[in-house]
Amino acid sequence: MPGGVQLGEPDYIAKNTRERERLQHLVETLSDEDLRRPVNEHWTIAAVMGHIAFWDARSLWLADKIDSGVPFTSSDIEPDDVTWINDSNRGLIHAIDPREAARFALRTAQQTDDRVARMDPAKTWPTDPESLLNPMRAAHRGEHLDEIEEALKRSSATVRPGTR
């Protein structure tokens, strides 16, 4: 089956794979110049990929807690408004070499997808409403990959033929 998805696997595995493959295509085809292009006034394409990696890494950390039998605490709960988290790490993410940020995002996505695919769904949200780990990484990645693709379209539309 495409993407290595097997029958009977949870739906999030196929969705995670699809969005990770979109990320992989971008990482493999975008130039270093493309990775430096703005997505919006605050983020470049590479930085958005770094942002995706940051939140995937949080999922890995939550999976470690589950696998270690360490209970979640109130400080582990993601706040409703994560703006301060994203804004406070934006400078750090932009300080990473764009190509390395892109590669790191892809490696972290692969590690996260592999990890959540091996986990017992009964230990993750929503099957376990007390779990802080949502194995569906595709929604977050897809949202930001859509933004990247839109930024690339805008960028291409502003370049006159023969100037690129």
Image (spheres, rainbow, N blue to C red):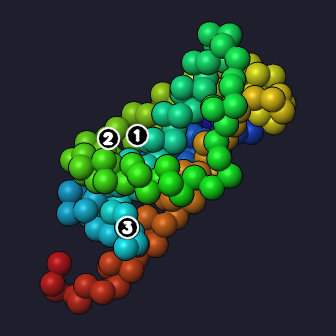
Q: Nearer the viewer, mark 1 or mark 3?
A: 3
Q: Residue at x 68, y 25 (%)?
A: 73
Question: Which disc number belongs to residue 129?
Answer: none
Mark 3 or mark 2: which is in front?
A: 3
Dividing the picture into quadrants, the one containing residue 65 is top right
| Crowding at mark 1 (Cα within 10 Å: few <14, some 14-19, many 20+) | many
Q: Residue 68 falls in which quadrant of the image?
A: top right
Quadrant containing the N terminus is: top right
Identify which residue is drawn at 32% across, 79% down. Answer: 156
Q: Residue 64's quadrant in the figure?
A: top right
The mark that comes first in sequence, 1 or 3, is: 3
The C terminus: image quadrant = bottom left
Could you classify mark 2 by the number of other residues whose Cα lies within 10 Å: few (under 14), some (14-19), or many (20 or more)? many
- For the residue pair 140 and 156, the one nearer the viewer reads as 140
Q: Are marks 1 and 2 in contact (CB under 8 Å)?
A: yes
Relative to 44, say whether 140 is above or below: above
| Circle number at residue 106 | 1
Q: Is residue 144 left or right of residue 29?
A: right
Q: Which mark is residue 103?
A: 2
Q: Which mark is residue 42?
A: 3
- Give the amino acid at mark 3: His
Check the image and name the residue furthest to the top.
68
Q: CA distance from mark 1 to mark 3?
A: 21 Å
The three-letter amino acid code for the residue at tag 2 is Arg
Between residue 160 and residue 138, name the one nearer to us. 138
Residue 67 shown left or right of residue 130 in the figure? left
As drawn, which residue projects farthest toward the front?
75
Check disc 2 and report its element: helix, strand or loop. Answer: helix
Real-space Cα separation, disc 1 to disc 2, in angstroms: 5 Å
In the rendered view, tell whether residue 149 sits above or below residue 102: below
- Which element is circle 1 on? helix
